[in-house]
Image (cartoon, rainbow, N blue to C red):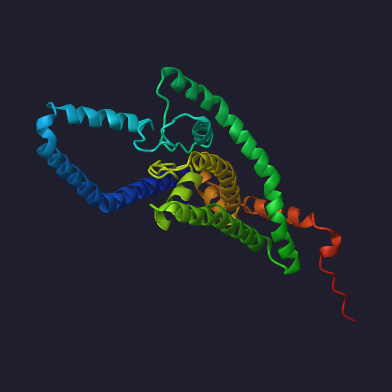
Amino acid sequence: MGGLRPWARYGLLVVAHLLALGLGAVVLQTLEGPPALRLQAKLRAELATFRADYGACLPPGALEELLGTALAAQAHGVSRLGNGSEARNWDLPSALLFTASILTTTGYGHMGPLSAGGKAFCVVYAVLGLPASLALVATLRHCLLPLFSRPVAWVAVRWPLAPARAALLQAAGLGLLVAGTFVLLPALVLWGMQGDCSLLEAVYFCFGSLSTIGLGDLLPGRGRDLHPVLYYLGQIALLGYLLLGLLAMLLAVETFSELPQVRAMVKFFGSSGPVTAEDQGVILGQDELALSTLPPSTTAPEQAPAC
C-alpha cells in the first residue's frame, strides 16, 4: 500500500469512514428499531384507552394540543411536572451548567434559550468563548503533560525501557487513569445515587459527557424529587466534572496521538512520501527529553570495563 498515490489514499480513507458510518447505522437500526416500535405502540394504546375513558369530556383535538404544548416545552427544558426542585429553570446552577455545556461543546440539549435575545447571546458567547476555552485547555495541557510523564520516565530509568515502549506505557497508564477516575468511579457514584439508572447507563452518561457527545437522554437528578440543596450541589458537581474530565480526556487523546504507530498511520494518509525516522521519532525525542530532566543520581551507574 506504500505505492498508492495520495488521492487513492484519501479515497480509501473516505470509503472506510463511510463504511463505518453505514455499519453504525445498520447496527443501531437493528438494536433500536424494535424497542422504538414497541414504545410507539404502547403510547398509541394508552392514548386510545384515555380517549375511550375520558374522550366524551374533552373537545376534539384538545388532548393532542395539550400534548403538543407539553412536548414543545419539554424540548426547552421547561416542563418538569411534579418536581419542585427542577421547576425553577434558568437558576444560577442550571445556567452555569448550560454555559459549560456550550464551552465544552457537550450540548446536553436538556434546556435551551427561548427568547431571540438568548439565542443571539448564545451565538456570540460561543464564538468568543470557544477559542478562549481552547487556549486555556492548550495551556493546561502544556503544563500537565510533562508532569504525567515523570513517573514513566522514572520507570524507564529504573528498568531500562526502549523509548517507544516507554511511550506506549505512558499512554496506557494515562488512559487507564482517566478511564478509572473520570468514567468508572463517577459512574459507580451515579449508579448508587440515581436509583432509576443501571450501571451501563451511568457509564454511558459519563463517556458521552467526556467525549462531548452529550445526547441529553440521561442527566443526573432529572425527573426526580430532589431537595433544592442536593439539586444545586449536583449541578455544581456536574459542572466541575465536565471541566476537569474534558481536560483529562484531551490529555489522554494527546498522549495516544503522539505514539509512533499513530503518527506513522497519519503520515501514511497525509503524504505520498515514505515514513521517515524523524516522523516516527518525535515522541521518542520527547521521552528522551523527559528522561534527561531526572537528576543524575537516579541514572544507572556505568559498567566498569572488564579487565
Q: Quadrant of residue 136?
A: top right
Compared with 247, 2 (above or below) is below
* Residue 144, position as x, y percentages in the image: 68, 47
* Residue 7, position as x, y percentages in the image: 44, 42
Residue 148 is left or right of residue 241, and the answer is right
Q: Which of 12 and 247 is in front in this view?
A: 247
* Residue 149, position as x, y percentages in the image: 69, 55
* Residue 102, position as x, y percentages in the image: 50, 33
Compared with 30, 136 (above or below) is above
Identity of the residue furthest to the bottom in this view: 307
Residue 34 is left or right of residue 282, and the answer is left
Give the residue at x 56% y 25%. 128
Identity of the residue furthest to the top in this view: 117
Q: Which of 254 and 97 is in front in this view?
A: 97
Give the residue at x 48% y 39%. 106
Q: Nearer the viewer, residue 73 or 298?
A: 73
Give the residue at x 53% y 25%. 125
Q: In which quarter of the image is the C terminus?
A: bottom right
Q: Which of 226 and 129 is in front in this view?
A: 226
Q: Is residue 1 visible?
A: no
Residue 232 is left or right of residue 161, and the answer is left
Q: Is residue 71 visible?
A: yes
